[in-house]
């Protein structure tokens, strides 16, 4: 995984492009600013900022509001969803997730390991699960505290597992969350990559998550898993069966 500190300044850096991205970063972090405030936070002069903002607005990356301030434009969202599409497994994946959610009555999630992170690639909501703002598309998932994350950890080597978990940190979400790598290792030792993985109240109180590692296809070096979120403490047997079946289906898409 490339870190910001590892990036070297290129000899042929295009200053205008770098400044435009600086403006876009300011608007993304703090939408609703006037151009003067954007210029101040970007460290650019007002004239340059006006030119950059107008160009970004023309291309759809920022949008001018009625009060004269600026917000993120729809092209930023478009690039985001294009990135998610590049992480996907194919056009049939969403239909499989939707079928899993409809069959079980629980929200279904597809996750993968990407650049040393556990990422939610897609999901399908269902009424039997609470809304989880931390499990939106494109967001990092806490590998040590979720069934989706643990299923994915079972699909990589122990060294890769250590690097991923220690880099992300082991935030304690509830009293049940594993707070050190030794405790997590003990949990994973009791799990199998070809079985349903469960966690009970480790990510949210009164919430159970179940997941299954997607069998890896020949030549595929990406680790995937599919999961469900369920209110209470019990994973119904039907949900376990459907998870196993869907994991197998996803391996062929």
Image (cartoon, helix red, strand yellow):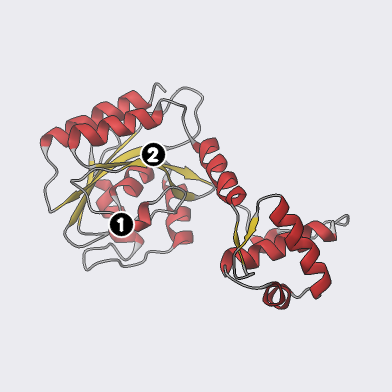
Under tag 1, what secondary structure?
Answer: loop
Q: Residue at x 79, y 56 (%)?
A: 17
Q: Nearer the viewer, residue 101 or 154?
A: 101
In the displayed image of the protein, which residue is found farthest to the front?
A: 66
- Asked which quadrant contains residue 241, the reply is top left
Image: 70 above or below 229: below
Task: Return the mark for residue 186.
Answer: none
Q: Residue at x 11, y 47 (%)?
A: 234
Q: Residue at x 13, y 33 (%)?
A: 238
Does 30 sit left or right of 59 as displayed? left
Quadrant of the rendering where the C terminus is positioned: top left
The residue carrying pointer 1 sits among few (fewer than 14), some (14 to 19) or many (20 or more) residues within 10 Å by Cα, namely: many
Q: Nearer the viewer, residue 122 or 237?
A: 122
Q: Nearer the viewer, residue 79 or 210?
A: 79
- Contact (Cβ within 8 Å) of mark 2 with mark 1: no
The residue that mark 2 highlights is 155
Does 232 sit left or right of 75 as displayed? left
Residue 55 can be seen in this image = yes
Does 111 sit left or right of 7 as displayed? left
x then y, percent, for residue 67: 60, 70
Task: Return the mark for residue 145.
Answer: 1
The residue carrying pointer 2 sits among few (fewer than 14), some (14 to 19) or many (20 or more) residues within 10 Å by Cα, namely: many
Does 46 sit left or right of 71 as displayed? right
x then y, percent, for residue 248: 31, 25
x then y, percent, for residue 158: 41, 47
Q: Residue at x 37, y 64 (%)?
A: 170
x then y, percent, for residue 111: 40, 42
- Asked which quadrant contains residue 57, the reply is bottom right
Image: 27 above or below 186: below
Residue 143 can be seen in this image = no
In the displayed image of the protein, which residue is found farthest to the right?
A: 12
């Amino acid at each position: 995984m490339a870190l910001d500190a590892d990036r070297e300044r290129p000899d042929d850096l295009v200053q205008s492009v770098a400044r435009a991205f600086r403006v876009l970063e300011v608007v993304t972090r703090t939408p609703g600013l006037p151009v003067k405030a954007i210029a101040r936070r970007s460290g650019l002069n007002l004239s340059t900022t006006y030119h950059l903002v107008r160009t970004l607005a023309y291309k759809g990356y920022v949008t001018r509001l009625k009060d004269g301030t600026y917000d993120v434009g729809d092209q930023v969202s478009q690039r985001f969803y294009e990135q998610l599409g590049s992480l996907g497994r194919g056009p049939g994946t969403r239909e499989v997730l939707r079928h899993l959610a409809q069959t079980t009555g629980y929200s279904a999630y597809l996750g993968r390991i990407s650049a040393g992170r556990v990422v939610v690639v897609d999901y399908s909501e269902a009424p039997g699960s609470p809304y989880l703002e931390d499990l939106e598309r494109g967001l990092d998932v806490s590998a040590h505290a979720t069934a989706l994350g643990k299923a994915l950890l079972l699909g990589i080597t122990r060294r890769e597992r250590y690097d991923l978990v220690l880099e992300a940190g082991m935030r304690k979400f509830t009293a049940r969350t594993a707070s050190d790598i030794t405790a997590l290792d003990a949990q994973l030792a009791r799990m199998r990559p070809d079985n349903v993985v469960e966690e009970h109240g480790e990510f949210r109180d009164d919430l159970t998550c179940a997941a299954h590692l997607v069998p890896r296809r020949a030549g595929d070096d990406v680790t995937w898993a599919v999961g469900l979120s369920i209110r209470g403490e019990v994973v119904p047997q039907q949900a376990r069966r459907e998870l196993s079946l869907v994991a197998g289906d996803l391996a062929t898409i």
